[in-house]
């Protein structure tokens, strides 16, 4: 894609945030767009947000489990940026009106204590870089109409990022086997999904390694204090006003997201 087309696509996605009106798939209007083009569109939006005063507080790996790849119709992971404005406090009401088509996923959040920069990052490097882990809920959202996304669409749309709710009990990485950590997801008091850490590329740590080695050649270093979401342990569940969603992860505790009754 030409630079003007990249900026044009980014502007359309940014407008969707402002108007609350989803757009047609990026790949429909730009059928020759590549994955590299999609990341350029994503970066264009990130530059806009940071110019306006927001701050990058981490990254997410998306589509890292077979369940999510099947649900979204894609065949590989992607990554997006987590901005400070995306973080919400546990148990504090969240406006669903701030999203277009929200869904929610349970994840194990890594909080880094050391910088991590690829290429060449190993599992050992990644483990040393992690300060602690937290249970988390990611609110995924799409600025693409009806979630009709290709891999190009979700990448261009900042990996379908929406919001993050972190639990408040940190756990050392050595205290739990993330591969075997089971997860239950309840919404409105009903069990809606189950999963385990092993669903995320075999281990959430593998997703952290993939991320560091993918963004490193682009000149991006994962920084101390940054949050990394490695991907969902279950399928994504739709969110409605008034919902209370609880993810319980064995060995890590639970995290709760509460959405305002009227969505305002």
Image: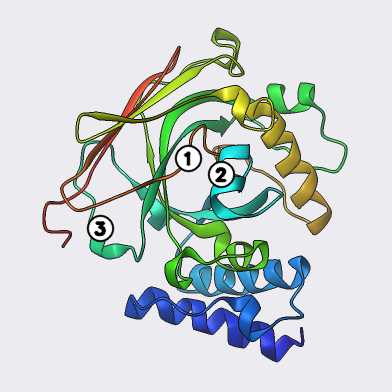
Residue drawn at (60%, 77%), measured in percent from left and top?
26
Residue 40 placed where, x, y %? 70, 72
Cα separation, mark 2 vs mark 3, equals 22 Å
Identify the element where label 1 is drawn.
Answer: loop
User: Which is more N-terminal, label 1 or label 2?
Assistant: 2
Visual colour scheme: rainbow
The C terminus is located in which quarter?
bottom left
Across and down, in percent, residue 23 comes to: 46, 79
Toward which corner of the image does residue 89 lie, by quadrant?
A: top left
Rendering quarter of residue 81: bottom right
Taking 139 as reference, is 8 left or right? right
In the displayed structure, would residue 193 be above or below residue 74? above
Per the rendering, the mark at residue 235 is 1
Classify mark 2: helix, strand or loop: helix
Residue labelled with disc 2: 68
Q: Is residue 32 above or below residue 122?
A: below
Give the number of the disc on residue 67.
none
In front of the other: 135 or 118: 135
**Residue identifier under label 3:** 96
Residue 132 spot, x, y in % from top left: 53, 23
Vertical arrangement, residue 192 with respect to residue 55, above or below: above
Based on the displayed image, in which of its 4 quarters is residue 200 positioned? top right
Of the numbered discs 3 and 1, the one sitting upstream in the chain is 3
Q: Which residue is painted at 36% across and 78% down in the image?
A: 21
**Residue at 77% of width from left, 67% of height from top?**
36
Outermost residue to the top? 175
Is disc 2 in contact with disc 1, using a CB cutoff of under 8 Å? yes
């Amino acid at each position: 894609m030409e630079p003007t087309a990249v900026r044009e696509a980014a502007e359309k996605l940014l407008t969707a945030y402002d108007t609350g009106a989803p757009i047609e798939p990026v790949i429909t209007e730009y059928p020759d767009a590549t994955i590299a083009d999609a990341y350029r569109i994503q970066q264009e939006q990130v530059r806009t947000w940071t110019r306006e005063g927001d701050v990058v507080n981490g990254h997410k790996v998306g589509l890292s489990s077979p369940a999510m790849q099947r649900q979204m119709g894609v065949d590989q992971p992607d990554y997006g940026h987590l901005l400070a404005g995306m973080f919400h406090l546990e148990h504090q009401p969240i406006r669903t009106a701030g999203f277009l088509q929200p869904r929610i996923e349970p994840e194990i959040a890594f909080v880094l204590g050391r910088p991590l920069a690829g290429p060449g990052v190993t599992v050992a490097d990644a483990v040393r870089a992690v300060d602690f882990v937290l249970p988390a809920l990611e609110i995924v959202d799409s600025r693409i109409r009806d979630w009709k996304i290709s891999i190009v669409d979700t990448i261009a749309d900042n990996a379908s990022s929406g919001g993050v709710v972190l639990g408040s009990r940190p756990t050392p990485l050595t205290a739990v086997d993330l591969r075997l950590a089971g997860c239950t997801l309840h919404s409105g008091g009903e069990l809606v999904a189950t999963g385990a850490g092993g669903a995320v590329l075999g281990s959430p740590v593998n997703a952290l390694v993939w991320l560091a080695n993918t963004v490193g050649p682009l000149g991006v270093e994962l920084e101390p204090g940054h949050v990394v979401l490695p991907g969902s342990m279950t399928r994504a569940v739709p969110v409605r006003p008034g919902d209370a969603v609880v993810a319980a992860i064995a060995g890590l505790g639970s995290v709760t997201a509460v959405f305002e009754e009227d969505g305002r």
